[in-house]
Image (cartoon, helix red, strand yellow):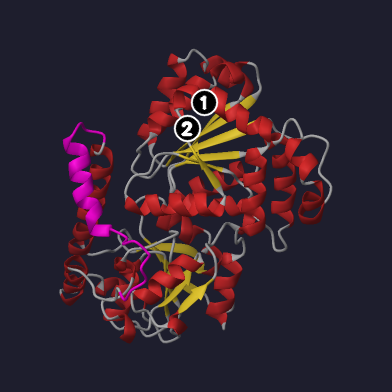
Amino acid sequence: MKKKAWVISINMGYGHQRTAYALKDLAVRKKIINANDYKEIPSKDRVIWESSRKFYEFVSRFKKAPIIGNLIFSLFDKTQKINDFYPKKDESACGFNHKGTYSLFEKDWGKDLIKRLSSKDKRPFVSTFFTPAFMAEELKYPGDIYCVVCDADISRSWAPLKPKKSKIKYFAPNKRTVERLRSYGVKKENVFLTGYPLPMENIGKNREILKEDVKKRIINLDPLGNYRRHYKGLIKEKLGTLPLKSDHPLTIMFAVGGAGAQKEIGVEVLRQLRNNLVNKEIKIILVAGIKENIKEYFEREIKKLNISEFVKETKLVEIIYEKDFGKYFDSFNKALRKTDILWTKPSELSFYSALGLPIIIAPTIGSQEEFNRHWLLRSGFGIEQENIDYTKEWLFDLLKDGQLAEIAMEGFIEGEQMGVLKIKKIIEK
């Protein structure tokens, strides 16, 4: 890309950062700018962003509190509610919260950021969160403004206050978000169906990296060969000849969300499959992200299971933890290449099903994830987590039947992998 773009994100959770990181090659000096945490951000701007982040993380964790936890979370969740898609209707009218956000722009929230990025060459402004895109438009950023959607369905909050007059262009991950944006009043010519931007280091320019990884994954996901016998023609057409064996043991990755919710599920998976680990039948990767307290929690629980020395010797349990986002995403993407099953709540990671990764869907947190869950199930890219106390039974039944191999191929064939290249082409054009 001859003219580099400003790639903007926020470091609140992993979703927007992960999306931006996939676009790093489009960015000036390959650097992602965090609208809520750049080097010289004014203190008044930081306070507004921080109050929002702390409240979200508190509510996400507090949800587990008896009775009152669910009540408080449900009240918060209403502010980001996604209405039923049918019957189709005009939903361009915005709510009180939206107007409140725009009132902060009138008080110069974001003015410092937009002023710093405004330049004579009018670089494209690409944001993976809607608020910086709104800032750019309201504070008269001179270049093109783009917003990358990172969920399978979205609330009205993603669209501008006055969508029919807005110049913000959207990169949509699927058809549903295209239709949602249109129902929110965004002009047809301002919405592009690109797919979600997945990491190119896991794909390759011509999908050569991805195909090799999926070949080995299918071997692990179909140990008895049931799927391969029934669909050998399809496999030959889409992947070519499979190897005789995989280059890694059956590997399950459990990814914790940005607020640290559901870390207990990862430990319970470890507990349920402890004997399989000791017998060297599987490998488990626990993703702590950039949260040191989550890493330490995993380490304590591993010790309680009396497998610390075993883990040290065999490396069949791995914890992914890094101190910053960039190193974390690098480690995560590298580990994905030898991962066979991704177990996580339905966040932006739902789109990683297009890498031929069957998703085991952990319980949702909030209506946004409920819609991502629905998309995964409807698309055939994921399957819901069953009773975790019987993981050893239902998980290995899925493997014996070849169902997880079938889900992996469905994601690989039907999912969109080239979102980054499509976004790059549109920006250049």
Of 107 and 374, the residue lying toward us: 374
Compared with 119, 343 (above or below) is: above
Mark 1 to mark 2 CA distance (whole Å): 7 Å
Residue 283 in sight in this render: no
Q: Which of marks 1 and 2 is nearer the N terminus?
A: 2
- The single residue placed furthest to the top in the displayed view is 306
Name the residue beneath numbered marker 2. 386
Name the residue beneath numbered marker 1. 391
Looking at the rendering, in which quadrant would you find the C terminus? bottom right
Compared with 20, 263 (above or below) is: above
Residue 252 percent coordinates (x, y):
57, 34
- The 10 Å Cα crowd at callout 2, few under 14, some 14 to 19, many 20 or more, is some
Q: Is mark 1 on a helix, strand or loop?
A: helix
Span shown in magenta: 64-90
Residue 85 percent coordinates (x, y):
37, 64
- The amino acid marked with disc number 1 is Thr
Q: Which residue is drawn at 63% across and 21% down?
A: 314
Q: Quadrant of the rendered structure where residue 35 is?
A: bottom left
